[in-house]
Image: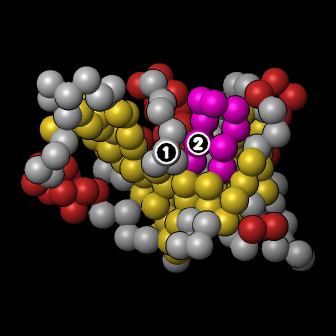
Amino acid sequence: MKGLTYFFAVIIAFSITACGSGTDETVDETLEAVELKGFEELNLSEWGFDLTVMVPEAEIHGAPEVVLTERGALEIVVGLDFGLEIMFGEGDIALLKMDLQDDLVFTSEIIKEEENAIIYTQDIPDSGVKTQNHFLYKAEVGTDIFEVRDVIDGEYGSGMIEKMLEAAKTIKATNKPGEVAA
């Protein structure tokens, strides 16, 4: 999956160089690469994050509930099946993997791993507690690094974790006044 990361890096590089070059073809490819069906862009500037992210369409799933927590995380919940948490951080996947391995309560299994993302399950054997599905994505936007994960209080199926990870990968900087979109 390292190729996917490099693909997005190349797309971003082309987008930056395409500004003013007159090549609409690159711009169209960029838009297609981050478009999710049934999702719409949500601007997070109102909550102090100069970012946008794709979330399920409000018309179908209800309006997103966005809360800036006391610890500085931005929680975005849409309906019962979608919940992202975005916060500044290191996005240290290696550290998370060590924590999962050393956990004395949960047994964890890594389901999918990419250069900047991991999907994993946590379970308490023989406890009757339902297996929990989680993800962590390291989003690099300009010089900032954000940790994007599922909302800790949510119970999400593995399919929705995949969808939320795909949505997390759409995070990008908002255009400041006077800037031209690539």
> Considering the image in quadrants, where does the C terminus appear?
bottom right
Residue 47 lies in the magenta stretch: no
Q: Name which residue lies at 74% across and 61% down.
A: 44
Q: Do the residues under discs 1 and 2 have CB atoms within 8 angstroms?
A: yes
Query: Horizontally, is 169 left or right of 117 in the view?
Result: right
In the picture, residue 99 is in which quadrant?
Answer: bottom left
Amino acid type, mark 2: Gly
Viewer-proximal residue among 26 and 140: 140
Pointer 1: what residue? 153
**Can the viewer see residue 47 in this picture?**
yes
In the picture, residue 41 is in which quadrant?
Answer: top right
Q: Residues within 10 Å of mark 2 (few under 14, many from 20)?
A: many
Query: Horizontally, is 112 left or right of 56 in the view?
Result: left
Q: Position of residue 178 (x, y in %)?
A: 89, 76
Amino acid type, mark 1: Asp
Query: Horizontally, is 129 left or right of 142 in the view?
Result: left
The stretch of residues the image draws in magenta is 76-84
Real-space CA distance between mark 1 and mark 2, rounded to the nearest whole angstrom: 9 Å
Tag nearer the camera, 1 or 2: 1
Q: Position of residue 142 (x, y in %)?
A: 56, 72
Q: Name which residue lies at 74% across and 48% down.
A: 65
> Which mark, residue 83?
2
Viewer-proximal residue among 98 and 152: 152
Against 146, is 34 above or below?
above
Of labels 1 and 2, earlier in sequence is: 2
**Can the viewer see residue 112 in this picture?**
no
Q: Position of residue 112 (x, y in %)?
A: 29, 34
